[in-house]
Image: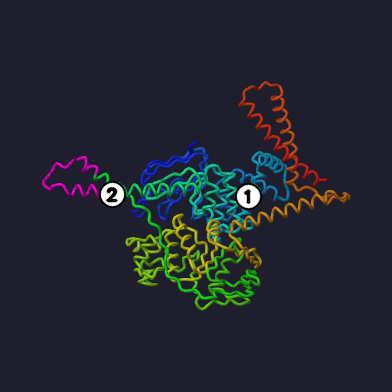
């Protein structure tokens, strides 16, 4: 079933062609990741398909009977409204009924009209599965760390909080099509893995831009690459995409090489012909023009080159002894001791707000420990790649930023190149070097920031969320550079793929100042956590079995004398009616099946499905009825 059709899309921005006669389709069941270099128009294409951006030309058609949920990187909220009002700013029938119901419950005295209205709302909410919806709200707000913030005004939120509110809003819409731009940014590991599972289970049709390769591989069944204005579709996950893309690149490069060889031979033939002769074989000349176009229509990919000279590292790097750090009444680091060694590779993980960024600032000297000692080696030179763009000056040109550090840069192999040549290696050709920093895309700014960090020739490299805003190709190159980096490496990241590839041990920030040191990468730590949880569950089950075996001593009911709240009383009354209706429906289906009056296999199949749903509903509602009845006494 086709949901979105896009034909002959054309879009240019600042004289740069982003989409060149692009055709794209999204069907029910497609879970697509859109990848490609930074600045090629991935986010623009998402906005066009979501109806948020205009086209130069082309047609986008979306089925009228489906809802599209779109979450972009800007997280546009109504700043004057509360978080709750933003979450349900778009009209939602279930939420409207819940708010109306809660308003009546808050009234101290209900008249007869209110009682009738409350009864009607209870029935309607039951039909809408509102109790399940309320549970979904609590789950989503809890996992995205938004509980307790419902009444906060959106304009007072941080950028990361706004991103999570926007994510919650689109998930609560429960749209048929989910369009997401970098959904894992500003989420911690736990939230990413929860979102990964939620999207896989509840949403059937997805289009997203993401750099998170594990997320992509576990959620998506197709990868679409946008490059040089064209789309290439790969049916499969990220691993399959890598394999096929490499094959396609080798074939493309081989074809270019063959075309260039043919071009040279044809050019030689053309030049050898007598100048006065006007009857050169027309077919040869036509073929020459076609060969020329094939030889130079596309060039083989050139990778970003990360290579600079590094200052030699001494025996002492950074030593921390019994370091404590307090901030805003919180104990973020407690009696932490660690002696960093040359070439050490550490990953840092933990929930948001437990002190990871504060720890980094302790290492750089920006924060001063409350107690304890931090001793840095004389030869230790720190390069800090942060999440912020504080060092970048929007009014400066790219070439000016680099030249302020050095006009000539010494590379790892001892060679020297100009600032302009250095920028070219970072995929900023001479015309692009004249751009102002403020006009760059997020990914391009990140590239400049990484470049400025490496220009300092660090031997202790600290990377805070280095994978944010980078395209897949740049991530590959950066990982290869970091694997060969001879100095000490410290990475704070929610990118599980990156940590698995680079970290040999982890600092796990657990909260309340506690930091544990795990000897392994992220996947190994995750496996150890799952093993630990399974063991605890087994011990709990064994303990419960022993308690069941003990003689039961009757105790007075704790709920004796406790009455149901008005809401619970109404729920109980509704459950009694629901159970009665479900039993009637169940008997009707069982009678039809028993009499044999239905012979069509499709009808029989459907009756079987309906009976299963009724039995599930009976089980759930019966358990709730027993719970409320027991509480009522």
260 magenta-colored: yes
Residue visible at 62% across and 54% down in the picture = 143
Category of crowding for the residue at label 2, using alpha-carbon neighbours closer than 10 angstroms: few (below 14), some (14–19), many (at least 20): some
Residue 323 in which image quadrant? bottom right
Category of crowding for the residue at label 1, using alpha-carbon neighbours closer than 10 angstroms: few (below 14), some (14–19), many (at least 20): some
Q: For the C terminus, give its image quadrant.
A: top right
Residue 447 in which image quadrant? bottom left
Q: Which residues are magenta?
A: 259-287
Which residue lies under the disc numbered 1? 137
Q: Dot 2 lies on which element? A: helix
Q: Is residue 574 visible?
A: no
Q: Is residue 517 left or right of residue 9?
A: right
Where does residue 117 sit, x and y in percent of width and height? 68, 41
Q: Which mark is residue 261?
A: 2
Where does residue 622 sit, x and y in percent of width and height? 75, 39
Q: Is residue 382 shown above or below 568? A: below
Q: What kind of secondary structure does the magenta stretch mostly adopt?
A: helix
Front position in the image: 447 or 242: 242
């Amino acid at each position: 079933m086709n949901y979105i059709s896009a034909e002959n899309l054309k879009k240019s921005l600042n004289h740069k062609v982003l989409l060149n006669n692009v055709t794209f389709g999204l069907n029910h069941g497609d879970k697509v990741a859109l990848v490609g270099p930074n600045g090629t128009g991935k986010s623009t294409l998402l906005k066009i398909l979501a109806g948020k951006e205009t086209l130069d030309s082309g047609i986008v058609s979306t089925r009228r009977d489906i809802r599209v949920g779109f979450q972009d990187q800007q997280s546009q909220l109504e700043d004057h409204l509360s978080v709750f009002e933003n979450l349900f700013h778009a009209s939602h029938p279930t939420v409207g009924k819940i708010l109306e119901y809660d308003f009546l419950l808050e009234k101290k005295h209900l008249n007869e009209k209110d009682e009738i209205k409350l009864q009607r709302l209870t029935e309607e909410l039951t039909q809408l599965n509102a109790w399940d919806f309320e549970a979904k709200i609590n789950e989503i707000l809890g996992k995205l760390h938004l509980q307790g913030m419902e009444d906060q005004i959106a304009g007072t939120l941080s950028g990361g909080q706004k991103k999570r509110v926007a994510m919650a809003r689109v998930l609560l819409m429960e749209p048929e099509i989910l369009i997401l731009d970098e959904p894992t940014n500003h989420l911690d590991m736990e939230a990413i893995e929860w979102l990964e599972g939620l999207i896989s289970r509840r949403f059937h049709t997805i289009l997203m831009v993401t750099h998170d390769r594990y997320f992509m591989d576990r959620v998506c069944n197709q990868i679409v690459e946008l490059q040089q204005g064209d789309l290439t579709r790969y049916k499969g996950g990220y691993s399959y995409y890598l394999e096929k893309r490499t094959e396609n690149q080798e074939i493309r490069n081989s074809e270019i090489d063959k075309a260039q060889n043919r071009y040279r031979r044809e050019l030689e033939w053309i030049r050898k012909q007598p100048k006065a002769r006007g009857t050169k074989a027309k077919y040869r000349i036509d073929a020459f023009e076609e060969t020329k176009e094939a030889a130079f229509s596309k060039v083989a990919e050139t990778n970003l080159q990360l290579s600079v000279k590094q200052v030699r590292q001494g025996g002492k790097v950074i030593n921390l002894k019994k370091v404590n750090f307090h901030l805003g009444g919180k104990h973020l680091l407690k009696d932490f001791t660690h002696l960093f060694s040359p070439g050490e590779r550490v990953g840092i993980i933990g929930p948001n707000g437990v002190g990871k960024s504060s720890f980094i600032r302790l290492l750089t000297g920006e924060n001063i420990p409350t107690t304890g000692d931090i001793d840095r080696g004389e030869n230790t030179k720190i390069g800090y790649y942060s999440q912020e763009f504080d060092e970048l000056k929007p009014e400066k040109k790219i070439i000016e930023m680099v030249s302020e550090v050095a006009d000539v840069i010494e590379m790892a192999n001892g060679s020297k190149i100009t600032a302009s040549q250095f920028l070219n290696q970072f995929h900023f050709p001479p015309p692009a070097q004249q751009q102002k920093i403020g006009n760059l895309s997020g990914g391009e700014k990140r590239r400049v920031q990484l470049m400025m960090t490496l220009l300092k020739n660090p031997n202790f490299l600290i990377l805070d969320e280095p994978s944010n805003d980078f395209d897949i190709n740049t991530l590959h190159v950066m990982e290869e550079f970091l694997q060969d980096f001879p100095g000490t490496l410290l990475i704070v990241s929610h990118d599980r793929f990156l940590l698995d590839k680079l970290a040999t041990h982890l600092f796990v920030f657990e909260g309340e100042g506690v930091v544990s040191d795990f000897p392994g990468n992220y996947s190994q730590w995750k496996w150890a956590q799952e093993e630990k949880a399974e063991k605890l569950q087994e011990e709990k089950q064994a303990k419960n079995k022993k308690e069941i075996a003990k003689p039961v001593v009757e105790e007075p009911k704790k709920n004796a004398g406790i009455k149901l709240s008005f809401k619970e009383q109404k729920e109980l009354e509704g459950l009694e009616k629901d159970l009665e209706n479900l039993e009637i429906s169940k008997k009707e289906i069982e009678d039809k099946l028993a009499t044999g009056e239905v012979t069509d296999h499709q009808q029989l199949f459907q009756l079987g499905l309906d009976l299963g749903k009724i039995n599930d509903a009976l089980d759930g509602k019966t358990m709730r009825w027993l719970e409320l009845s027991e509480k009522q006494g």
